[in-house]
């Protein structure tokens, strides 16, 4: 797994790094920390965002204090400029089992975060946002909702200090990816949360048929000693159902290619979900 963590100087970004580090302690993913800045494309990166990235790297590595750390020690990193308007600080991969890189891009935050998702081929983007008012970033109010709706990868939007007792995961029994199932497994284990799986029905999909097809997903989690609860929801009632669930715990929504949920839940609704939910939101792809 490769995780991209987008940060700015606000406390919600620090919380995103903390949550990413907690996940990394279980999964040992490859990690990139990304900041975006305005400025000229000179030979040296702007100092303020680069200092921020190094500070967040120290915070990330602190989560491994007193135990084996799969990521490089700070003194091994070297600065490079792999592309115009992009700087990177990384260590030789042979010096540690896993890779942790700092990336700085110049430009508009939303555009550059989405570009980094595409260029890096990451599996999961983690981004924090304010929990009290429309889930914005200070320099780009629309960033969390925009990247959640448009990124080519899964996106976890962290709000506040998550205390997750239940995860409501809306999964397509025909299409959901193995990587998404595993990510849910990691988060349920991390938060010690109750897992509730939601399947979608309509006139063409009888409840008994959907329940039978969801059996494989249930078996996957039962084999990992997780006892999920299954609920079936008619597609016409799904938007209102999801809005209610978002007030009570982390909502995960499978929006991969050909997802049945994309037919009843548009990109605009994804943005509304991210902006309006008081809890973290996970968009799966």
Image (tube, grey):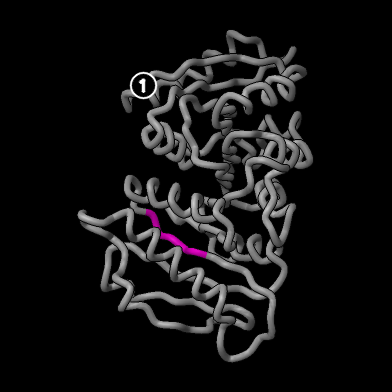
The extreme bottom residue here reads 43
104 w.r.t. 173: above or below: below
Residue located beneath label 1 in the image: 222
Residue 154 place in picture, x, y as percent: 57, 46
Residue 279 place in picture, x, y as percent: 59, 34
* Residue 62: quadrant of the picture: bottom left
Q: How many marks?
A: 1
72 magenta-colored:
no
| Observer-nearest of 203 and 95 | 95
Residue 190 place in picture, x, y as percent: 38, 37
* Residue 275: quadrant of the picture: top right
Q: Main secondary structure of the magenta part?
A: strand
Residue lying at 37% horizontally and 51% vertically, measured from the top left: 24
What segment is highlighted magenta in the picture?
29-33
173 w.r.t. 135: above or below: above
Residue lying at 46% horizontally and 25% vertically, measured from the top left: 165
Secondary structure of the residue carrying numbered label 1: helix
Quadrant of the frame with the C terminus: top right
Q: From the viewer's perspective, is 63 left or right of 104?
A: left
* Residue 209: quadrant of the picture: top right
Residue lying at 28% horizontally and 55% vertically, measured from the top left: 64
């Amino acid at each position: 797994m490769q995780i991209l963590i987008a940060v700015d100087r606000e406390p919600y970004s620090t919380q995103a790094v903390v949550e990413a580090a907690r996940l990394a302690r279980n999964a040992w993913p490859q990690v990139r920390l990304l900041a975006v800045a305005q400025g000229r494309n000179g030979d040296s990166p702007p100092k303020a965002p680069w200092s921020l990235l190094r500070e967040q790297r120290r915070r990330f590595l602190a989560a491994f204090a007193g135990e084996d750390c799969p990521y490089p020690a700070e003194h091994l990193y070297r600065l490079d400029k792999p592309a115009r308007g992009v700087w990177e600080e990384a260590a030789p991969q042979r010096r540690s089992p896993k890779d942790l890189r700092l990336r700085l891009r110049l430009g508009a935050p939303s555009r550059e975060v989405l570009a980094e998702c595409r260029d890096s081929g990451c599996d999961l983007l983690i981004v924090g946002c304010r929990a009290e008012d429309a889930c914005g970033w200070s320099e780009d109010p629309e960033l969390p909702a925009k990247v959640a709706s448009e990124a080519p990868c899964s996106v976890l939007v962290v709000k506040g200090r998550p205390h997750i007792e239940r995860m409501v995961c809306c999964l397509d029994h025909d299409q959901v990816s193995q990587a998404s199932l595993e990510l849910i497994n990691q988060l349920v284990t991390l938060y010690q949360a109750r897992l509730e799986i939601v399947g979608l029905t309509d006139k063409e999909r009888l409840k008994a048929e959907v329940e039978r097809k969801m059996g494989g997903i249930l078996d996957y989690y039962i084999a990992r000693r997780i006892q999920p609860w299954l609920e079936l929801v008619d597609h016409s009632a799904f938007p209102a159902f999801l809005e209610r669930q978002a007030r009570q715990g982390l909502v995960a929504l499978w929006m991969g290619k050909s997802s049945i949920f994309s037919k009843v839940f548009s990109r605009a609704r994804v943005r509304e979900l991210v902006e309006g939910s008081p809890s973290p939101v996970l968009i799966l792809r």
